[in-house]
Amino acid sequence: MSRSSIHISVPEAVKRYVDTRVGESGYGSVSEYFRNLIRDDRQRQLNRMQSIRRVATTSVPQFRPLAAAARKQK
């Protein structure tokens, strides 16, 4: 996988906080810390979308057949 860089500017207090988190949490680098934040954010978004879909397919009558079909496929 190819890599790209993202450069951000943050206030000094934020940089100190990130440096502290990197040291306390055992991350190997600031980049690793930010990659983990992004992975966690992506997972939260996926969970949120799955939750919305689950609610929609179980509470909206016209979607109930789709929800039943999806459960059978698992």
Image (tube, rainbow, N blue to C red):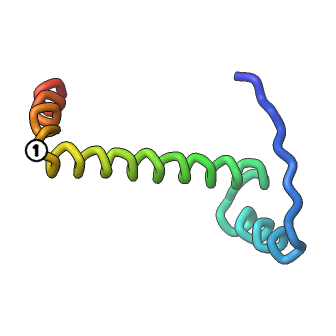
Q: Which residue is mark 1?
A: 61
Q: Is residue 24 above or below residue 13?
A: above
Q: Nearer the viewer, residue 37 or 30?
A: 37
Quarter of the C terminus within the rendering: top left
Residue 65, position as x, y percentages in the image: 10, 33
Q: Is residue 33 left or right of residue 44?
A: right
Q: Which amino acid type corresponds to the residue marked 1 in the rendered image?
A: Pro
Residue 9, position as x, y percentages in the image: 88, 60
Q: Is residue 61 above or below residue 25?
A: above
Task: Please give the name of the residue rendered at 71% of the width and 49% of the height, measured from the top-left corner.
Answer: 32
Q: Nearer the viewer, residue 64 or 35?
A: 64
Residue 6, position as x, y percentages in the image: 82, 44
Residue 22, position as x, y percentages in the image: 73, 62
Q: Is residue 62 above or below residue 55?
A: above
Q: Secondary structure at mark 1?
A: helix
Q: Is residue 28 left or right of residue 45?
A: right
Task: Please give the name of the residue rendered at 54% of the width and 52% of the height, measured from the top-left corner.
Answer: 40
Give the image quarter of residue 23: bottom right
Q: Which residue occupies the extreme front position in the image?
A: 62
Task: Please give the name of the residue rendered at 75% of the width and 23% of the height, measured from the top-left corner.
Answer: 2
Q: Is residue 63 left or right of residue 33?
A: left
Give the image quarter of residue 67: top left
Q: Which residue occupies the extreme bottom position in the image?
A: 13
Quarter of the N terminus within the rendering: top right
Crowd around label 1: few <14 · some 14–19 · many ≥20 (10 Å): few
Q: Total of numbered circles in the picture?
A: 1
